[in-house]
Amino acid sequence: MRSIYLDHSATTPVDPRVVEAMLPYFSEIYGNASSSHVFGRQAESAIEDAREAVARVLGCKPSEVIFTGCGSESDNLAVRGAAWAASQQGRGTHLITSPIEHGAVGKTVEQLAGLQGFDRTILPVEPDGTVTPEAFRAACRPDTTVASIMYANNEVGTIEPIAELAAIARERGIVFHTDAVQAGGQLDLNVDRLGVDLLSLSAHKFYGPKGVGVLYVREGVELTPSQTGGGHERGLRAGTHNTPLIVGLAKALTLAYEELETRTAYLQALRDQLIEGVLSRIPNAQLTGHPTRRLPSHASFVFDGLGEADLLTALSLKGISASAASACKAGTAQPSGVLLALGYAPELAATSLRLTVGIHTTPDDIDYTVETLAAIIRKRTRHNTAYPASA
Ligand code: PLP
């Protein structure tokens, strides 16, 4: 049976060139980067080379690159760290975010509000998933200290107008964080063009290893660490450096941006083939997210009248690995909070399907997926009179 992986927003396979770069750091160059002897110096030098490589892609100083244990940790450090620092300095306790953030931002803001009395505004979003500059401007207050808006959404793929939002924040002295975990390897990450103060990345989304992330911290932006201990990473992230993973992250990011144009053109062509195929072959399919301002890899749909059909299992039985923007709990589909925030009715939101292509996906994989999906939906849609007789 065929095996087609269309879940690259969840994670990507590690590029063999990345594996090769990492290997010596497991058992040959294994020193602790904090040790002063030769073993430690070798590891430290690999980490500083990796920091410089990341800084080249971000257009920042190496000292502004902080290595973390994952994208979630970067988000936690950014939001909690900036909110705590501002509040300790008496600058205010109002935070702004969107209802479509990953839990690493959303739940951190909720915790700051619930446990520590921070005030927060959750912005409205457009039906296509866009956070508008107007809504953002209207939410800013004199006591707003931190705003966190994702660069691209993980469920519907919409790309947010980060440069415009960050400019509004900067005029008001608000620290602006963006979760760029889904954008990494696909969109421009130059922090000055974006104008952001804090930016999170995770290596496993761009053909690097799992369990390693980056937080870009603009010089002068103050963060209070939550993971305290040794003075690693400028005191912002205690813990012995994971040299192989840091080397792998830097290698994967460098490759992604050296090959950016060819990779994104290829992904976009596959994505468009998929979207066109699904929309033309499946009459009750609707694209979710923005029609054009979306990640090159990302296609996401809901299916009118489909009811509680378990699409993922049906696709999986045909060899297609995909994901839904909803989590299945005890057999009942929980509609995605993102789609509800976009205004979808719970019944429609519960039919969501996310198909994300990668650099190893082929046009033939897409044809097979469209045909298979069309057959599954045709069989399961309650109101299948909507189909033309030939479909
Ligand atoms: N932010 C977004 C938008 C994501 O999609 C993810 C992972 O899916 C994360 C953060 C968390 O990254 P990690 O898996 O490295 O913790």
Image: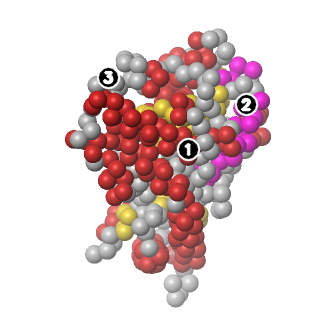
| Rendered residue at 64%/11% (across/down) | 90
Q: Which quadrant of the figure has residue 83?
A: top right
Mark 1 and mark 3 residues within 8 Å of each other at the beta carbon: no
- Ligand 1 closer than 8 Å to label 2 CB: no
Is 332 placed left or right of 86 in the picture? left
Secondary-structure class at tag 2: helix
Q: Amino acid at mark 3?
A: Ser
| Rendered residue at 55%/66% (across/down) | 262
| Rendered residue at 48%/32% (across/down) | 66
Mark 2 and mark 1 residues within 8 Å of each other at the beta carbon: no
The percent coordinates of residue 191 (x first, y second) are: 63, 40
The span picked out in magenta is 142-171
Is 107 above or below relative to 282? above
Q: Which quadrant of the figure has residue 385?
A: bottom right
Q: Amino acid at mark 1?
A: Arg
Q: Amino acid at mark 2?
A: Arg
Return the disc, 1 or 3, that comes first in the chain's sequence: 3
- Residue 219 numbered tag: none
| Rendered residue at 47%/61% (across/down) | 356
Q: Quadrant of the N terminus?
A: bottom left
The percent coordinates of residue 179 (x first, y second) are: 55, 40
Q: Tell me, what colour scheme is on the image?
A: secondary structure
Look at mark 2 in the image and give the residue it sits on.
170
Residue mark closest to the camera, 2 vs 1: 1
Secondary-structure class at tag 1: helix
Look at mark 1 in the image and give the residue it sits on.
56
Return the disc, 2 or 1, that comes first in the chain's sequence: 1
Badge 2: how crowded within 10 Å, few (<14), some, or many (20+)?
A: some
Is 268 above or below relative to 253? below
